[in-house]
Amino acid sequence: MLAKSVRLNLKKEFARVKKNSVSFSGLYFTLLVARGEGESMFGFVVSSKVGSIVRRNRIRRLLTEAVRGNLEKFPKGRKYIFIGKKEALDTSHEKISLEFDKILPRIFR
């Protein structure tokens, strides 16, 4: 689990990031990135269309662990929202980490 200080929790924080963000789409998730001040912050969302709460929480946990393992790679001072896709259900943590490695260089442009 990520530290509470680096998680986006409030509805207004999510709305602000969604409004001012740039989108990067991958196979297992879509990443919304917005400029912010201070520490980088992360939020995780999975649509109810994906399935039951158990399935959505599994995707959230996979994404959270992948972020936790790659925290030092993310540019500082930005806000990130990960929107999990249904395809992430049948995959492993390693494949999601590989997807991170593909998307992260696009953020730096």
Image (cartoon, rainbow, N blue to C red):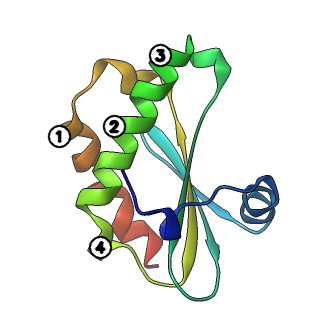
Which residue appears at 65% of the width and 55% of the height?
Answer: 9
Q: Is residue 98 visible?
A: yes
Which residue appears at 43% of the width and 78% of the height?
Answer: 108
Q: Is residue 27 visible?
A: no
From the viewer's perspective, is 52 left or right of 35? left
Decide which of tag 1 and tag 4 comes sooner along the chain: 4
The quadrant where residue 2 appears: bottom left
Viewer-nearest of labels 3 and 2?
Answer: 3
Decide which of tag 1 and tag 3 comes sooner along the chain: 3
Which residue appears at 23% of the width and 58% of the height?
Answer: 69
Amino acid type assigned to the residue bearing label 1 in the image: Glu
Viewer-nearest of labels 2 and 4?
Answer: 2
Viewer-nearest of labels 1 and 2?
Answer: 2
Decide which of tag 4 and tag 3 comes sooner along the chain: 3
Amino acid type assigned to the residue bearing label 3 in the image: Val
Q: Residues within 10 Å of mark 2 (few under 14, many from 20)?
A: many
Q: Which residue is mark 2?
A: 62
Give the x, y percent position of residue 5: 51, 70
Q: Which residue is mark 3?
A: 54
Decide which of tag 3 and tag 2 comes sooner along the chain: 3
The quadrant where residue 90 appears: top left
